[in-house]
Structures are given as structure tokens and as C-alpha cells.
Amino acid sequence: MKNRYLLCILLTALMLYYALPHLAFSVQHEAGIFSIAWLGLALLVFAGNLTAWLFAPKKQRANKNVDKPLPKRVKSHN
């Protein structure tokens, strides 16, 4: 999962790097409103994936109980 988050972060950064020179940030036109909305959504995607990547729980060993020997049971004979 962490690899997926890192991949999404890198792809978002690549999209921002490519798109920022082409966006017009004037609020007076429709293109400016689109640019601000697109930038806001891109930053939300970046922040969400960064948060998920940083705060993902650590992966526990799947075979945790396999290494421990089972306690032996004593049979009682009446």
C-alpha cells in the first residue's frame, strides 16, 4: 500500500509540474476559476496521499504465531 501512495504522490507532483506553467490564475475569467479549482483539487490529492503514506500502520508479520511452539497438554488418566 505504501508503494501505491508514493506512486500517487509522485504522479500528482508530475502533473503539478507540467500544469502550473499552463494555468492562468486570474479570477476574472472562467479559465482562472478552473485553474484555481484544479490546483485546489490537486493539492487535496497530494495532501491526502501524503497523509496516508506517513500515517499508514506498520505491517505486522503474518506468521507471528507460527514461530512460537504450542504449549503441551498433559492428559490425565483417571
Image: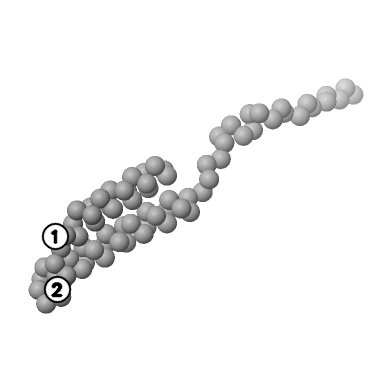
- Specify the amino acid type for callout 1: His
- Number of marks: 2
Circle 2 residue? 26
| Image location of residue 59, percent across then percent down | 52, 42
SS at circle 1: helix
Indicate the quadrant where residue 61 lies. top right
Residue toward you, 57 or 12: 12
In the rendered structure, the answer to whether residue 19 lies left or right of residue 7 reads left
Residue 54 located left or right of residue 4: right
User: How far apart are the two marked residues, 2 and 1, measured between alpha carbons?
Assistant: 13 Å
Residue at x-position 46% and y-position 53%: 54
Q: Which residue in the protein does label 1 denote? A: 22
Q: Label 2's element?
A: loop
Which residue is drawn at the image coordinates 28% and 48% (left, top)?
A: 11
Q: Residue at x 26, y 62 (%)?
A: 41
Does the image show residue 31? yes
